[in-house]
Image (spheres, rainbow, N blue to C red):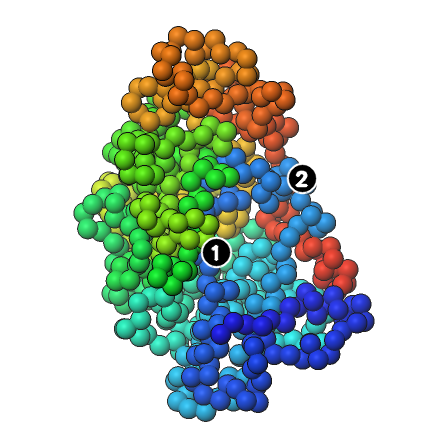
């Protein structure tokens, strides 16, 4: 049943203008549902809950607005670091109708008659959805108004200000605990519904976020409570581990096993998947995962450089690593690189018609989540691939990182977490003693970490970036680690040794050419005529005297983007948060901006 929502922003706008339609404001958020005639049984609750899934269970398939992406000019992050995002230009804050739908059920669930365990099961699912909603709000704004009930036009809380982060976070944790304690486990469920272990996975994610955020962000003045959240992150992850319900998907096929998590028609029966979204072709329900490949962004060179060599040593420890050409960059690397970035020789049509990445976006085009079988991609919103919401792999990474932050990590902990992920793709184990005794200088420069576990914590951060790339978690990780310098650093694309023809497919024949302008073709004059005829040509200066990318040494070097020529800024701590749109603060003068906004 489709929800008919009562938008909070419209309530505020209408009331401020003194032109509220009382009948409209008193309408219930679900089509033709009145509390008096509905919510009388667990089945009523179940029917209503079914209408909440689409709006409350996102499954991201990109890392836009983070340092994992390059070339995406015009994104929110692009505006932020170029100082064009403020209270007048920012979006967001207009999704409170989603919360009202959830609270409407919670306000009325007490009317239901029947088995108490069944009723609490559905209340637990609603509170799980509310926890997801508020997790996003805390991560975006820090202090936010907490609404524990559905608002009406005469509600005294309608114009309330922000509640303290600590109070909202405690309420989120209370919702999650209720969900964990009351949501039933249905062994017949294929993982597309909310279950107890999805609530535990969310608890481990939220508590790791909040614990590390409080530890590294002194401006929120909550460092003294960071440890308790980290301990809860460990406890939640341990409960998932101890259940023995989930295992890392590993059939001995290395990268192919990793790929199957992101490009399969169905994830039913995959024991790594705690929760997933189904996009069945027979029901005409699709997604847009084909857009990840060279659509409006590529992946950043810093992400590509994060993947280890096949022998477990850092790519950045190789002599001349920063002058490695495109095809050589993929040789002898962690197999997850070629499952995440379109590699030389990849074909979208699974034949000899090879995909050629474009340098104007950076050339490291995202492959992860792209539907490999052409039959799975039919066009806009008609891609039929299952998408994970929570993977056991993330729970294991949450467990390892929280224990490392607490100073209690052991080699045995690594062996039941990080090393299971590495063994899936046939990479060497992470050794605690070795990592702490030989800190990677590149990681050390990238993140502010200290303590006895510094080396292994940095490696866990690397593993998290690599394993969870493009799953929508990177920006939260950057923010909670207080690593804004990663966002201030201008993203780069591939290294270009010289203007002229470049082999992108690995057959030693040029596929593209980067030329100084539309008239100077001297750098490709020596190529065979048939090769020149097939080249895709890109110009540092087009016929209008401009372009969106350049090479940092003029005629060679790494691809950079024209929008960053004047530099990027990241204001601490302001840019870890977003402003509330000005219209909302005018309508409700109790909503105050914080941290410099």
Pointer 1: residues within 10 angstroms few (<14), some, or many (20+)?
many
Q: Residue 568 versus residue 100: which sits nearer the camera?
A: 100
Q: Residue 188 versus residue 5: which sits nearer the camera?
A: 5
Distance CA(mark 1)–CA(mark 2): 26 Å
Residue 271, numbered circle = none
Does 422 sit left or right of 147 as displayed?
Answer: left
Q: Residue at x 36, y 25 (%)?
A: 504
Vertical placement of 301 versus 417: above or below?
above
Q: Residue at x 61, y 51 (%)?
A: 577
Q: Where residue 521 appears, x then y in whole percent? A: 49, 12
Callouts 1 and 2 close, C-beta under 8 Å: no
> Can residue 375 be seen in this snapshot?
yes
Q: Secondary structure at mark 1?
A: helix
Residue under label 2, please give it: 83
Q: Where residue 440 appears, x then y in whole percent? A: 38, 34
Q: Residue at x 39, y 49 (%)?
A: 378
Q: Where residue 430 appears, x then y in whole percent? A: 28, 43
Vertical placement of 155 versus 472: above or below?
below
> Can residue 308 be seen in this snapshot?
no
Residue at far bottom of view: 113
Q: Residue 76 versus residue 591: which sits nearer the camera?
A: 76
Q: Residue at x 34, y 39 (%)?
A: 348
Q: Secondary structure at mark 2?
A: loop
Residue at far left of view: 252
Vertical placement of 69 versus 211: above or below?
above
Pointer 2: residues within 10 angstroms few (<14), some, or many (20+)?
few
Vertical placement of 108 versus 186: above or below?
below
Does 432 sit left or right of 117 as displayed?
Answer: left
Q: Quadrant of residue 177 in the image?
A: bottom left
Q: Residue 435 versus residue 594: which sits nearer the camera?
A: 594
Indicate which disc, 1 or 2, sits on the residue closer to the N terminus.
2
Residue under label 1, please give it: 209
């Amino acid at each position: 049943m489709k929800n008919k929502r009562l938008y909070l922003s419209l309530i505020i706008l209408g009331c401020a203008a003194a032109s509220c339609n009382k009948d409209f404001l008193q309408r219930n958020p679900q089509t033709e549902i009145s509390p008096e005639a509905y919510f009388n049984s667990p089945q009523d609750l179940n029917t209503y809950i079914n209408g909440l899934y689409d709006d409350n269970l996102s499954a991201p398939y990109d890392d836009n607005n983070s340092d994992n992406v390059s070339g995406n000019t015009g994104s929110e992050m692009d505006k932020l670091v170029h100082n064009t995002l403020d209270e007048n230009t920012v979006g967001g804050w207009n999704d409170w109708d989603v919360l009202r739908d959830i609270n409407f059920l919670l306000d009325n669930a007490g009317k239901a008659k029947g088995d108490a365990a069944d009723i609490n099961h559905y209340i637990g699912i609603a509170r799980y959805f509310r926890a997801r909603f508020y997790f996003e709000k805390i991560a975006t704004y820090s202090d936010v108004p907490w609404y524990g009930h559905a608002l009406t036009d005469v509600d005294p809380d309608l114009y309330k200000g922000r509640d303290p982060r600590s109070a909202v976070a405690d309420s989120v944790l209370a919702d999650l605990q209720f969900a964990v304690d009351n949501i039933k486990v249905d062994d017949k469920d294929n993982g597309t519904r909310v279950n107890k272990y999805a609530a535990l996975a969310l608890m481990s994610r939220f508590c790791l976020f909040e614990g590390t955020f409080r530890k590294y962000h002194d401006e929120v003045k909550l460092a003294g409570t960071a440890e308790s959240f980290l301990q809860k992150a460990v406890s939640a992850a341990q409960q998932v581990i101890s259940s023995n319900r989930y295992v890392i998907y590993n059939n001995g096929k290395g990268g192919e096993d990793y790929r199957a998590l992101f490009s399969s028609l169905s994830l039913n029966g995959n024991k790594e998947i705690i929760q997933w979204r189904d996009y069945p072709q027979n029901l005409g329900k699709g997604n847009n995962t084909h857009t990840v490949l060279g659509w409006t962004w590529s992946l950043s060179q810093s992400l590509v450089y994060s993947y280890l060599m096949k022998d477990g040593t850092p790519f950045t420890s190789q002599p001349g690593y920063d002058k490695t050409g495109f095809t050589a960059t993929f040789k002898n690397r962690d197999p997850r690189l070629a499952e995440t970035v379109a590699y030389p020789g990849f074909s979208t049509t699974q034949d000899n018609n090879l995909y050629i990445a474009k340098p104007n976006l950076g050339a490291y085009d995202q492959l992860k989540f792209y539907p490999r079988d052409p039959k799975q991609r039919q066009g806009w919103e008609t891609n039929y691939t299952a998408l994970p919401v929570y993977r056991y792999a993330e729970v294991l990474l949450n467990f390892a990182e929280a224990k490392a932050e607490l100073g209690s990590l052991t080699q045995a902990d690594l062996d039941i977490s990080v090393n299971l992920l590495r063994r899936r793709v046939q990479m060497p184990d992470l050794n605690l003693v070795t990592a702490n005794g030989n800190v990677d200088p590149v990681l050390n420069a990238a993140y502010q970490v200290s303590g006895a576990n510094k080396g292994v914590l940095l490696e866990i951060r690397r593993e998290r970036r690599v394993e969870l790339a493009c799953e929508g978690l990177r920006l939260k990780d950057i923010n909670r680690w207080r690593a804004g310098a990663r966002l201030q650093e201008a993203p780069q694309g591939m290294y270009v040794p010289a203007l002229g023809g470049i082999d992108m497919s690995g057959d030693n024949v040029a596929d593209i050419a980067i030329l100084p302008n539309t008239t100077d073709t001297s750098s490709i004059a020596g190529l065979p005529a048939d090769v020149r005829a097939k080249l895709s040509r890109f110009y540092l200066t087009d016929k209008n005297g401009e372009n969106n990318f350049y090479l940092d040494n003029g005629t060679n070097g790494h691809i950079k983007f024209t929008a960053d020529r004047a530099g990027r800024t990241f204001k601490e701590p302001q840019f870890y948060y977003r402003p509330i749109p000005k219209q909302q603060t005018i309508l409700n003068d109790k909503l105050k901006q914080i941290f410099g906004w």
